[in-house]
Image (cartoon, grey):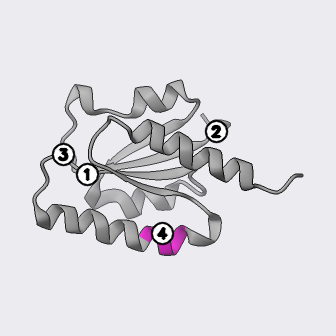
Amino acid sequence: MNAMPKVLVVDSGERPPDGALSAELAGMGYASVTTPFEAADDVLALIPSPAAVVLQMPRHADWAERRRFLDLARRLRKNLGETGTPVIITGGVSGAATMLQNQLSVRVAAAPDL
């Protein structure tokens, strides 16, 4: 698992079986760690350089919950901005993997040649 790029997925803690991104991410070659919102900072401290952070907002979140996710996204983008780590907000599984793939493709294309 150390050689695979890691993606942190932050959700509300409620994980319906059809709502997990882990299978899609594994199929794309990414290891993933899913954590509830409240533990996001602690888990992020354990992952030295994630390939991306995906905030998986519940589809039917009320305004207060949406606000929490938006505030976290803003803070993470500020803190992770220097590393270029994308912070992606999604309202469910559909489209999240595609958004992640697009973000990481842009990042790889923009990386300097070594």
- Give the mark nearer the N terminus: 3 vs 4: 3
Query: What numbered label is drawn on residue 77?
Result: 4
In screen coordinates, is 99 left or right of 15? right
Q: Which residue is mark 2?
A: 2
Q: What amino acid type is highlighted by mark number 4? A: Arg
Q: Quadrant of the N terminus?
A: top right
| C-beta proximity under 8 Å, tags 1 and 2 | no
Q: Residues within 10 Å of mark 1 (few under 14, many from 20)?
A: many
Residue mark closest to the camera, 3 vs 2: 3
Sooner in the amino-acid sequence: mark 1 or mark 2: 2
Query: How many residues crowd mark 4 within 10 Å: few (<14), some (14–19), many (20+)?
Result: some
Q: Amino acid at mark 1?
A: Met
Number of labels in the image equals: 4
> Quick check: is 13 in the magenta stretch?
no
Is residue 3 shown left or right of residue 80?
right
**Circle 2 Cα neighbour tier, 10 Å, few/some/many (<14 / 14–19 / ≥20):** few
